[in-house]
Amino acid sequence: MNIGAHVSIKGGVTHAFDEIREIGGTCGQIFTHSPRGWRFPEIDKEEASRFRETYGKKEIWPVLIHESYLTNLATPREDIYKKSMETMEKEIAAARTLGIEYIKIHPGSHLGQGEEKGLMQIANSLNSLEPEIDDIIILLETTAGKGTDLGYTFEQLQYLRDTITYETGVCLDTCHVFAAGYDITTKEGLDRTLNQIDNTIGISTLKAVQLNDSKHPFNSRKDEHAHIGLGEIGKEGFRVFVNHPVIRDLPLILETPVDETRGHRENIEAVRALVTP
Ligand SMILES: [Zn+2]
């Protein structure tokens, strides 16, 4: 089982590897800069080369880049759109500097201009980045569908994949798909959901799983993560999920809270305890 968590790069990007090891993980995810601001501090060249060296050994793999929270490729606001595109270019440059192959994005929120227009804008935006993409893979994340967020149905992700002129992958978030109304908590439900994935985006496009329990019920379209087994998906739901042959082979990356109840280490242990050999 390849499991890890979203970790901090405070003190330098290579700190990510230390933290992943500390929590007993073998994969992970980072922000390349503060996700709540547009500022993009330069990555130290020596740090970057140390990062590439360690990453190249693949003892910890993959490490995804999580795009900034502010980026919205579907926004009707011109100033935000311009900043979002600049941020995407910087994320791609950071991925190249660090030797990271995956940048994970939430497709975007249309903010009232309509789903169709929003989806088209996302696809066009990503298409305009094609010259810079090269071998970097954009992972479209499944969303919970709160507010005007797009990417909460597999059909929307399929539209994006079909319209984007280069190959993209998909990152499945357990909290989000559950909140978006896809059952993953029973054997029958999970089989049905994976079938729906295979009939739209295709199972082989799944490159990683964001493993989060949900504070809100099934189909609530709300996005709040809970500790593994302590939310609405629950322990038995995760037992079904992580033991499925399709899921077992994927990198599982936690974005669960770190608080007095549990940290990442405890959540990783909770997941491992559910796995049947
Ligand atoms: Zn979420």
Image: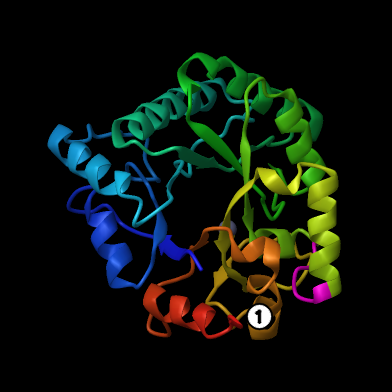
- In the rendered image, residue 159, in percent from the top left (x then y), is placed at 78, 32
Considering the whole magenta stretch, tell me its main secondary structure. loop
Q: Residue at x 80, y 62 (%)?
A: 182
Above or below for 220 versus 231 = above
Describe residue 196's horizontal placement relative to residue 69 as left or right.
right
Residue 41 in the image: state x and y as whole percent: 24, 34
Can residue 63 be spotted in the picture?
A: yes
Packing grade of label 1 (10 A; few <14, some 14-19, many >=20) is many
Q: Is residue 260 left or right of residue 77?
A: left
Q: Nearer the viewer, residue 196 or 112?
A: 196
The picture quadrant where one finds residue 260 is bottom left
Q: Position of residue 107 (x, y in %)?
A: 63, 38
What residue sits 84% from the left and 69% below the top? 189
Outermost residue to the left = 46
For residue 127, above or below residue 108? above
Q: What's under tag 1, amino acid-wise?
A: Arg
Q: Quadrant of the C terminus?
A: bottom right
User: Residue drawn 50% across and 36% down?
Assistant: 71
Q: Which picture quadrant has residue 249?
A: bottom right
Q: Residues in magenta?
A: 182-187
Q: Is residue 1 magenta?
A: no
Residue corresponding to mark 1: 239
Q: How many marks?
A: 1
User: Helix or strand or loop: what does disc 1 sit on?
Assistant: helix
How is the rendered protein coloured? Answer: rainbow
Residue 263 appears anywhere in the view = no
Q: Quadrant of residue 123?
A: top right
Split into quadrants, the picture shows ligand 1 in the one at: bottom right
